[in-house]
Image (tube, grey):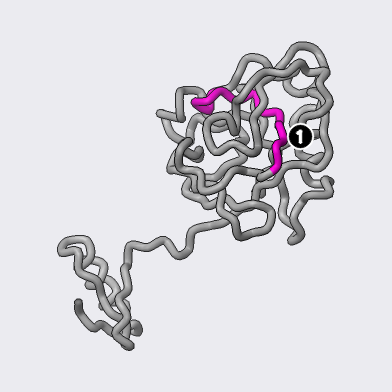
Amino acid sequence: MFNLSKNLKTNLIICSMLVLFTGLYCASEDGTAESTTGNSNQETRKVFVTDTSYNGNLGGFSGADEKCNSDGSKPSGGGTYKAMLVDGTNRRACSTANCSGGTGEHIDWVLKPNTKYVRADGTNEIFTTNANGIFEFGTLSNSISETTLFAWTALNNDWTSSTNNCQAWSSTSGGSRVGAASSSTGNAINVTSQTCTTSTLRLYCVEQ
């Protein structure tokens, strides 16, 4: 471990090279080991489940987003939220399983790549997205909610879009996929189907 001054940019470059090629760490002036590979600047965003429940006619995506931003459970702080819903055309996570083609598959998608998402309390981590802007099941630190609630999604377990989406969230005709907010598995986004007339389902709302 080498003792390098924090004040010299050249030392930071040298330190980075040491970590990359030797696995050694640099030390701060007080002798504390510091890794240059940590991502201390990782962005954090919040996710919450709406207090209000709805049928599948949400007024389209703009209506769903407005419902997120006017909900009583929206965290303080003034952030803008979007509903984690898809239809494959207006809003989409992936066109291939787990976005094998990368973020270019997104259309107005609500999750950002390499970002930590926490509950409304701002402290309890739920998941961290990967480079494709989705999270891998089995890696959730906590469920989205501790309460047994169900939310509209139209998502399949591989993040592709179900063909059933209450006519792009503007009708009570047909049905769609829903997620279980208390699950930390793939059930979080796709646990069952419900008819679009069902009026007891919530929205997942994601800070932008």
Task: Residue 109 in the image: state x and y as whole percent.
Answer: 60, 36
Instruction: Name the residue located 41 percent from the left edge and 61 percent from the top edge.
Output: 39
Total numbered badges shown on the rendered structure: 1
Please report the bounds of the magenta region as a residue range.
Answer: 147-160
Q: Is residue 90 visible?
A: no
Q: Secondary structure at mark 1?
A: loop
Examine the rendered structure and indicate whether residue 33 appears above or below residue 174: below
Instruction: Specify the principal SS of the magenta part.
Output: loop
Task: Residue 101 in the image: state x and y as whole percent.
Answer: 41, 29
Task: Residue 136 in the image: state x and y as whole percent.
Answer: 46, 37
Instruction: Name the residue located 49 percent from the left edge and 26 percent from the top edge.
Output: 158
Q: Is 139 in front, or is 24?
A: 139
Is the N terminus in the top left, top right, bottom left or bottom right quadrant? bottom left
Q: Which residue is mark 1?
A: 202
Q: Is 42 in front, or is 7?
A: 42
Three-letter code, disc 1:
Arg
Image quadrant in which you'd find residue 166:
top right
